[in-house]
């Protein structure tokens, strides 16, 4: 890999602190009572601590970890949804978060209208989406239902539409959470082929999984998260071996 | 920052478009309600205040036009700020998953309500035209009517500022929604919508001053000066409402920027 390239994703000493209050205070009365009686205490919890790594363009990194290790928090930080308490994240390129397909949909809007809305959510103009419109439509195979409000779609149809839009705009960075199990077997094959073709084009991938076989197959490098800290990083094979060992020890 | 605004201007446009489209979807008369609703509510108010209660309201020249001016402005103010207030909480599912500059939500709601407000202003045009043609006491229409855009712009700024502040408060305290409903009712009676302040014959200057502290008082008065009385407004109204709106916007932006990163933990 060319070392002169700037990293596509650079996570620098990121820490995230959550204040877990025992009960959520969302009304004024409770807030003032607790403030006056000084019961406004929080349980502090570091979801991520001093996490640093870099992902070069075209690199595919696997993020391994047990439940509650901070994987989803890390993805949220990279996607820009969550601001880190300390440290910084620098992302160079367009991110397509495939974690929640159709998160930007409006249920009362038709499929056609949602394509433009979702495109705009990712920062694309109406004109640009119009050039991709036919591609999206033929990929998701929803031609008959495109003028029906999305609230009447099945969850599989919604996911198909979301997947078609998110991948049609050719993002530079792809965030994959677990395996993509979108729609039926036929569509799954199609979506796997699409992702493979994006791999071939050199898209940068952040892949979260429990399954080390998938990580070995998909990724070149990997990191292991444990209780919010990076405990191992290196090639996918090395990290997967460490992870498997830990899984066996736990048993 | 600027690059960010540039990139997401499409999103702003799309959300404004969506809000307007969805507002009247599934209603038979559709966008026609933008005209019908102010028309009908004004008729009700005219009926109540010039026939049933105090006949002296008709002392105000062109009372229906007078009332419509106030009502349109009040309605836009409350609708837009209420929508902006709920906008962040309502978009929780998107905000939690995709990065979007969050100010887009309150802003787009104010803009979409503003658009329907502009459309509904045509009812006012019809009213004025009616009085010009068929009434013995036509509206004093002068060139000042073209200045009506000034109070409208000030009103827009005010709504953006108040909307930003309310949207932040709503994220942390849901009570604000109920409190604000009551507050809007208070404003309805404290703004000269269906009455004229002079007609109240207030001796108590404190009460009068409280009423005038309401920026909507100045905005409604300026608007009426332009379109109804055909004269230049009182400049103190202009400066007061402009300063109030600008301060609201600055406060709103500062509060919003300061707390926006915490939204995700509370919605």
Image (cartoon, helix red, strand yellow):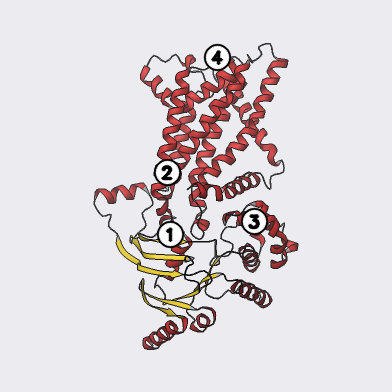
Secondary structure at numbered mark 3: helix
Q: Is residue A232 left or right of residue A169?
A: left
In this rendering, the label closer to the viewer, 3 or 2: 3
Q: Which residue is mark 4?
A: B56
- Of labels 1 and 3, earlier in sequence is 1
Identify the mark at residue B259; answer none if there is no mark: none
Q: Is residue A92 left or right of residue A46?
A: right
Q: Nearer the viewer, residue B223 or A17?
A: A17
Query: Residue lying furthest left in this view?
Result: A37
In this rendering, the label closer to the viewer, 3 or 4: 3
In this rendering, the label closer to the viewer, 2 or 4: 2
Q: Which residue is mark 2?
A: B176
Marks 1 & 3 on one chain: yes
Secondary structure at numbered mark 4: helix
Secondary structure at numbered mark 1: loop
Q: Nearer the viewer, residue B145 or B8?
A: B8
Q: Which residue is mark 1?
A: A82
Mark 3 to mark 2 CA distance (whole Å)? 31 Å
- Where is residue B55 shown, x and y percent of the image? 57, 16
Residue at image point 69% right, 16% down? B132
Q: Which residue is mark 3?
A: A114
């Amino acid at each position: 890999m060319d070392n002169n390239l700037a990293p596509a994703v650079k996570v620098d000493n990121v820490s995230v602190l959550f204040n877990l209050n025992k009960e959520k205070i969302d009304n004024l009365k409770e807030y003032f009572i607790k403030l006056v009686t000084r019961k406004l205490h929080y349980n502090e919890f570091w979801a991520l601590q001093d996490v640093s790594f870099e992902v070069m363009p075209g690199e595919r990194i696997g993020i391994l970890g047990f439940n509650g290790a901070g994987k989803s928090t890390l993805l949220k930080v990279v996607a820009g949804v969550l601001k880190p308490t300390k440290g910084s994240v620098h992302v160079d390129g367009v991110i397509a978060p495939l974690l929640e397909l159709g998160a930007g949909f409006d249920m009362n809007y038709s499929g056609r209208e949602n394509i433009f809305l979702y495109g705009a959510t990712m920062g694309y103009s109406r004109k640009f989406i119009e050039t991709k419109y036919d591609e999206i439509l033929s990929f998701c195979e929803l031609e008959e239902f495109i003028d029906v409000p999305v609230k009447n779609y099945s969850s599989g149809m919604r996911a198909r539409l979301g997947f078609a839009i998110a991948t049609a705009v050719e993002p530079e960075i792809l965030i994959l959470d677990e395996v993509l199990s979108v729609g039926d077997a036929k569509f799954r094959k199609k979506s796997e082929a699409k992702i493979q073709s994006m791999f071939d084009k050199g898209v940068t991938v952040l892949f979260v999984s429990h399954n080390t076989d998938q990580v070995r197959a998909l990724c070149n490098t990997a990191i292991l998260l444990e209780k919010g800290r990076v405990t191992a990083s290196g090639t996918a094979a090395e990290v997967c071996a460490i992870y498997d060992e830990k899984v066996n020890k736990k048993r | 920052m600027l690059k960010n605004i540039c990139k997401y201007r499409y999103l702003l446009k799309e959300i404004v478009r969506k809000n307007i489209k969805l507002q009247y979807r599934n209603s038979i008369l559709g966008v026609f309600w933008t005209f019908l609703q102010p028309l009908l509510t004004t008729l009700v108010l005219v009926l109540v205040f010039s026939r049933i209660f105090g006949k002296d309201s008709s002392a105000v020249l062109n009372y229906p036009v007078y009332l419509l001016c106030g009502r349109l402005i009040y309605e836009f103010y409350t609708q837009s700020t209420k929508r902006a207030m709920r906008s962040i909480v309502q978009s929780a599912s998107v905000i939690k998953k995709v990065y979007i500059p969050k100010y887009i939500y309150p802003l787009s709601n104010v803009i979409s309500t503003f658009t329907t407000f502009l459309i509904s202003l045509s009812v006012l045009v019809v009213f004025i035209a009616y009085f010009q043609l068929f009434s013995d006491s036509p509206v004093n229409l002068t060139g000042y009517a073209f200045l009506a855009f000034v109070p409208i712009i000030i009103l827009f700024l005010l709504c953006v500022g108040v909307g930003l502040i309310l949207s932040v408060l709503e994220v942390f305290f849901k009570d604000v929604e109920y409190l604000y409903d009551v507050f809007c009712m208070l404003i309805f009676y404290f703004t000269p919508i269906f009455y004229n302040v002079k007609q109240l014959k207030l001796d108590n200057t404190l009460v009068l001053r409280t009423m005038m502290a309401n920026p909507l008082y100045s905005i409604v008065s300026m608007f009426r000066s332009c379109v109804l009385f055909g004269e230049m407004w009182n400049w103190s109204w202009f400066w007061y409402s402009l300063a109030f709106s600008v301060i609201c916007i600055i406060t709103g932006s500062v509060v919003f920027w300061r707390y926006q990163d915490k939204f995700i933990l509370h919605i």
